[in-house]
Amino acid sequence: MTANPVAKKAAPKVDLDSTREKLGRLGLVHATDHLAETLGEAVKEDWPPHRFLDGLLDHELRVREERRLKTALRLSGLPTGQTLGNFDFAFQPSVERSRIETLATCSWIREKESLLMQGPSGPDETCVGQVTGRSVGYG
């Protein structure tokens, strides 16, 4: 028998277990968990290799950032539940909505400015502080 010079080469097999192990050893736990799903999408959409790797790393970074924010909020000691979305501005007429929304953008942090809240004793400063504090991770 003669060899067929036109015959196609078989595609190399991908050993996902080995790849998972290597990702785990590198500490990329979330990428490890998401490997099969990302690979399936990459094959289905015919992604180039760098796009596949980028998607896997994006997932790892996104999950890590979400975890970091949850941990920071838990450690901050801020009470749960109070957010800008459910803040009752009608109940607190002394609080200007536009100012609070501006504070919630956290531009004052990026500009390395301080925030001082003062006023008569009452719930206003506490509520505004909680809402602003919860916005820091998302602003």
Image (tube, grey):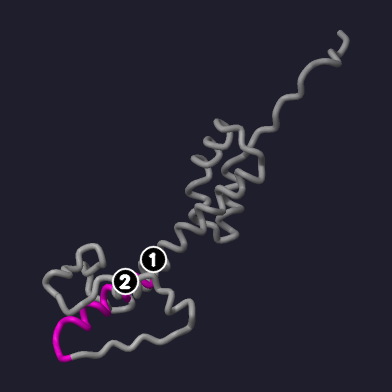
Q: Secondary structure at mark 1?
A: loop
The quadrant where residue 131 appears: bottom left
Residue at which label 1 appears: 138
- The image position of residue 136, as x and y in percent, is 38, 72
Q: Specify the quadrant that holds the C terminus.
A: bottom left
Task: Give the residue displayed 66% in from the left and 42% down from the top.
Answer: 49
The quadrant where residue 72 appears: bottom left
Is 75 placed above or below 23 here?
below
Do labels 1 and 2 touch, CB within 8 Å? Answer: yes
Chief SS of the magenta region: helix
Q: Secondary structure at mark 2?
A: helix
Is 110 placed above or below 32 here?
below
Task: Give the residue displayed 21% in from the left and 90% down from the top.
Answer: 119
Q: Amino acid at mark 1?
A: Tyr
Q: Residues within 10 Å of mark 2 (few under 14, many from 20)?
A: many
Magenta-tinted stretch: 120-136
Q: Is residue 32 left or right of residue 12?
A: left
Residue at which label 2 appears: 134
Q: Is residue 30 left or right of residue 47?
A: left
The quadrant where residue 104 appears: bottom left
Task: Give the residue displayed 48% in from the left and 54% down from the top.
Answer: 30
Is 133 placed above or below 113 here?
above
Say whether residue 94 is magenta. Answer: no
- Residue 15 vs residue 74, the one in the foreground: 74
- The image position of residue 82, as x and y in percent, is 22, 69
Q: Residues within 10 Å of mark 1 (few under 14, many from 20)?
A: few
**Image mark for residue 62:** none
Q: Amino acid at mark 2?
A: Arg
